[in-house]
């Protein structure tokens, strides 16, 4: 079942259980997730947001059978996430890649991450959140009021849907800006090596090697 909502300048589609088979995203898809918390082993995955950078967002709501859903039986979504021909664009990919790997059983690659790119080139600041990037690079103010809301609710509120969509609607534009900065500062190759490592970093986190980090002293 799918529903459509509109926000200024964007169209939002909420799908339950899976993406429709006919939805495509081209060569690069922006992705984000919403969970019940920050522990992938404890906190279930509730929502996956995707956008082709065309001012349209597709949100897939996932719920266990006890709440009337199909759990993680979402073959169309998994197909997109695992497709090696589609670049997956995230902000803080380390968390999302691990969550998707743990819950859906797919290795998400190839990956780009606007947070890593920002940290490599915006060394004049320690503010690398999505809200900060959108404000500085795009002149867009994002609302984070729904960041800590109940994503496991059977019915999501319009404010939650708009918030979740905003996390993917601007990633293509951000990546274009950051990609230019990476080239300018001659750090594109370094960034690519960081991105290639992200699925492994997620696997390490899932095994408990996030703390202590095996790369620390």
Image (cartoon, rainbow, N blue to C red):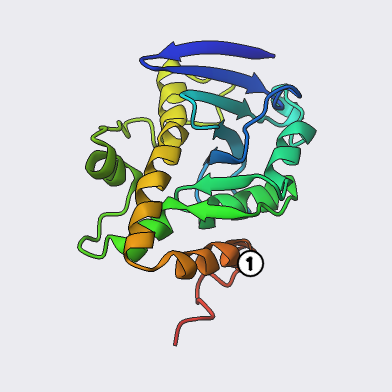
Residue 71, image quadrant:
top right
Figure quadrant of residue 74: top right
Image vertical order of residue 134 relative to residue 200, above or below:
above
Q: Nearer the viewer, residue 123 or 173?
A: 173
Q: Quadrant of the C terminus?
A: bottom left
Left or right relative to 189: residue 22: right
Q: Residue at x 36, y 15 (%)?
A: 8
Q: Position of residue 203 (x, y in %)?
A: 65, 64
- Spot occupied by residue 169 in the image (x, y as percentages of width and height): 44, 31
User: Residue at horizontal 70%, vertical 14%?
Assistant: 1
Residue 174 drawn at (x, y percent): 38, 43
Helix, strand or loop at label 1? It is: helix
Between 150 and 102, which is closer to the camera in this rendering?
A: 102
User: Badge 1, how many Cα within 10 Å: few under 14, some, many 20+?
Assistant: some
38, 187: nearer the viewer:
187
Tell me: residue 198, above or below residue 163: below
Residue at numbered disc 1 = 200
Residue at 46%, 82% in the rendered image? 216
């Amino acid at each position: 079942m799918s529903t459509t909502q509109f926000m200024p300048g964007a169209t939002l589609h909420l799908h339950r259980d899976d993406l429709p088979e006919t939805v495509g995203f081209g060569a690069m898809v922006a992705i984000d997730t919403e969970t019940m918390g920050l522990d992938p082993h404890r906190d279930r995955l509730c929502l996956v947001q995707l956008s082709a950078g065309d001012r349209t967002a597709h949100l897939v709501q996932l719920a266990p059978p006890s709440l009337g859903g199909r759990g993680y039986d979402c073959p169309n979504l998994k197909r997109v996430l695992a497709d090696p021909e589609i670049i997956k664009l995230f902000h803080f990919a380390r968390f999302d890649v691990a969550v998707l790997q743990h819950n859906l059983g797919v290795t998400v690659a190839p990956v780009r991450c606007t947070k890593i790119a920002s940290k490599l080139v915006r060394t004049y600041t320690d503010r690398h959140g999505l809200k900060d990037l959108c404000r500085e690079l795009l002149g867009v103010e994002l609302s984070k009021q729904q960041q800590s809301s109940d994503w496991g609710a059977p019915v999501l509120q319009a404010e939650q849907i708009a918030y979740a969509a905003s996390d993917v609607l601007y990633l293509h534009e951000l990546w274009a800006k950051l990609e230019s900065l990476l080239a300018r500062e001659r750090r594109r190759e370094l960034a690519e090596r960081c991105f290639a490592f992200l699925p492994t970093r997620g696997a390490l986190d899932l095994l408990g090697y996030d703390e202590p980090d095996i790369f620390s002293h």
